[in-house]
Image (cartoon, rainbow, N blue to C red):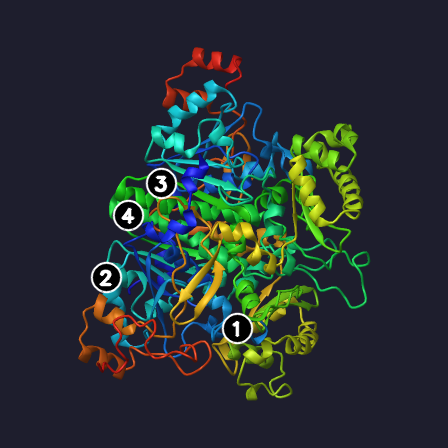
Amino acid sequence: MEQPWVDWVKERDDPRMAHAKAEALDDITVLDLSYKSYAGCYCSSLLAEFGAEVLRIEPPEGNFLRTCTPYGMLYKGEGLNYLTEGRNKFHLTLDLRKLEGRKILKALVSQADVLIETYRPGVMDDWGIGYEQLKEINPRLIFASITGYGQFGPMSRSQMPDYDNIAQARSGIQSGTGEVMPEGKSYDECPWATPTKAGPWIGWAQPGTFMAIGILAALHWRGTTGEGQALDVATAEAYARFDDYAALWYQGTGVVAERFGSLDTAGWIYCFAPTKDGAVFLGGLRLEMWQAFADMVGKWDEWEAGSWTNLTIFTEKEQQLKWAPLVFAETGKYTNEELVNMSIGYAKKGRLAPITPVVAPVCSPQETMKDANWLDRGIFISVKDPLYGELIVAQAQHKMTETPIRTKWVCRPIGYDNEYIYLKYMGFGPSKLNKLKKAGII
Amino acid sequence: MAEKTWQNYKEKKHSKPSPLKGIRVLEVCTLILGPSGPCFAAAMGAEVIKCEVPPLGDTCRDMTPFGYLFRGYGPVFVHSNINKYWIGLDLHKTEAQEVFLELAAKSDIIEENLRPGVMESWNVGYRQIKEVNPGIIYIAKNGFGQWGQYAEENRPSNDGASQAFSGYAWMSNFPGQPPLKSRIYVCDDYGGLMGEVAVLAALHYRERTGKGQFIELSQSENIMRAMSWVWPYQQITGKVAMPAGNRDVSVCPADTFYCADDSFVAIAAPAPQEFRGLCLAMGRPELAEAPRFKDHLVRLREENATEILKLIADWARTKTSGEIKELAEKHGFAASPIYTVKDVVEDKHFQERGFVTELDDPLLGQYQDYEFPVMMSRTPPRVKWSVRAVGFDNEYVMVHHLGKSKDEIRRLYECGALGKWSDTPGRRPPIDWDGKAGLILARDSEGKE
């Protein structure tokens, strides 16, 4: 190959050139009716990043999610979570509690490919706009529901709403994540040594992402057969699917995965280790990488690393508890930067080179946001939005040579796009819109 | 109405078509970030051919919790590799590269998670494959992507590195405690999932235009995408985003509480009706009307949130988590005990939905695992079979897909292009394997009848 791979690919997938390229989903229209759910907004964002025309429909008073913002903070009148997932969408209002509103929705449905909703099961049916009713209008419709308990099963008619922390709690993952209670201590002394959820809204973002691939697979099926269908994601189930070993371990042995701090039940060496100025992640899931670590910190002989033949033994609990303090004593002698450089250097000159342990600094998100590597790769390119100014929302999470994703605008206030969208899809001019507004329909 | 749509969903799952029927994926992946994406595609009916370097194959094969193997395999490996076909192909060998290109010419998608440039050094990189198949969709997943300082330093990476690099771990412990690693491989699995979003969008584009493309993905960047408010918050305030334990700083009240029966319960009740319901359940209806709590944005302020969460914590300690869940159902707010994995596997709701699903595998036997979590009324995704030994389906793929003769197959074995398992844990078939179960076109590796 005449041109080095790195140059060839960067020339074709640098996100800074995305705006000049084609969009994969610009033939698709999505109605996002999700309410009080980041999962729904996130799902439609993933489609909007690929150019789908997403009509975000909220009641005239706005989506409650707009008020779900850290510490109650607003930026130019908008909550920060809603701000990050308003991207590339048209924001309109429509009151589905009113008959006239539902009539308008049906007219939109007849022109749409995908509908995303997050109401409790039965609510859309009661309104006369459930899947069975809408498929009469548009048999090609893909009707995607994201809820806490799903569309069927004994708990599906629960009155309880869906939130990220509830999905995390029901997944089985929170219970096994967190610090170990120090011996002889109680909850009151160490309230941090308890089941611990992930800080970010992974119990919402992840089900939204699962639904996105369900929708795309359903579009593929529809392309072949013309058939639409209904899709059902329950947030706790989606998140639990990421629990890669606990269910099998439990079945085989009766062992319930417990908290193990920042060590790893299923891998060695695979942990956070304290350093002079913070902590690093150490990773090596092959015996040679663990040996390379021992060598890198000058313990090859003392630890008799050359005689190790089996990594599995090291993953056993007692072995981990024996070795972890020895490892931490070594990492404690260095700074994060020194350890990272030792690993890069070892890959070149070490006894086992090019094998080297994974060493990564444990960063604050502020350090992450200032890291030249990520800035270069375009994940934090700020969006120049006419309403919200230059704003940083994470983007370009994958890079593509033909149809890269892009963020064109970040968000819009309540009902901002009513005029354009209702004219485009419904033929409503200003006088009709005024009437609908006075009647509280939009 | 929803009842009609989903009636007997679980029972009828296997009598309906799969959404990705007819799509062929070639996988050259190890551990979790790589294999998880094709695993999702395989659950949706894509034909996934997993190529491993014999005789050891995927590093994940013997990755075990505290040394425990599930019927001879690492449980992470079993969970992340359902419904696949298995070939042992040593891509270091020219003859193996030729076989790979023959398969690539007949495939729709290639997935790999090696470091940048490795596939190309084996003559099976994107630029080489698109010569034989211009419509190919090729995704490369790893820690740092294909370019940039870290990629060019050729740094290795894995899930824990991404939890560290992205700030995700920083955001996921209690204030004052060091950053905490999740028990699950969240950046691996999430990278695999997000990769499929890109792959399936590219497939849609290819169906419209005939054009394939190259996709690259860094697992760190992926998890950053899911961290929502953190980035604009830091930009706007100039401050670092801080962890808050189990409290959700964007939803109030939402936290995990310690209960009277030494258990934990998660509660969320931010919307007006939900908050009123919680206050009523607590016997404190007046709180819902208090100016500092009435409005969600005001309630979210640090001093107000701290106060209401303390009131709820004191109340929760007088109840069991089960009692609180019942009160939540009655009053319309959200609550759940913190489920252990035992609770999930044995939960009647998860079982009746078929989320906890039963396999009856010719090699690994009967067991339960989690189903693909998107239920599709017309084309249900499903788990069908479990993992196989390295090179287990060599003969099937060589004969059925490439029409190779016995002699050709023998030559491929002789030169080391094709290979099978080593007799080690995670690589070989289960100890009680009868030499036949699970084989397709039952032929042995020597080509004897």
Number of disc labels = 4
Image mark 2: chain: B
Q: According to the image, label 3 marks what residue?
A: A25
Discs 3 and 2 share one subunit: no
Task: Residue type at mark 1: give it.
Answer: Leu
CA distance for labels 3 and 4: 11 Å
Name the chain under label 3: A
For disc 1, the chain is: A
Looking at the picture, does residue A105 appear above or below residue A371? above
Disc 1 versus disc 4: distance between alpha carbons?
A: 37 Å
Which chain does the numbered disc 4 sit on? B
Q: Position of residue B432 (x, y in %)?
A: 42, 79
Out of B211 and B201, give the one closest to the viewer: B201
* Residue labelled with disc 1: A285
Q: Are marks 3 and 4 in contact (CB under 8 Å)?
A: no
Residue at image location 58% in from the left, 51% down from the top: A369
Mark-to-mark CA distance, 1 and 2: 33 Å
**Where does label 4 land, which residue?**
B206
Query: Label 3 is placed on what type of residue?
Result: Leu
Please rate how many residues cluster around mark 2, counting C-alpha atoms within 10 Å: few if below 14, some from 14 to 19, many from 20: some
Label 1 CA crowd tier, 10 Å (few <14, some 14–19, many 20+): many
Q: Residue at x 23, y 61 (%)?
A: B105
Q: Are marks 1 and 4 in one subunit?
A: no
Inter-mark Cα distance, 4 to 2 = 15 Å
- Which residue corresponds to the image point at 39% horizontal and 59% vertical from the top-left? B38
What residue is drawn where x is 23% and y is 80%? B447
Question: Which label was assigned to residue A208?
Answer: none
Q: What residue sits right under mark 2 in the picture?
A: B105
Judged from the image, the secondary structure of the residue bearing numbered disc 3 is loop
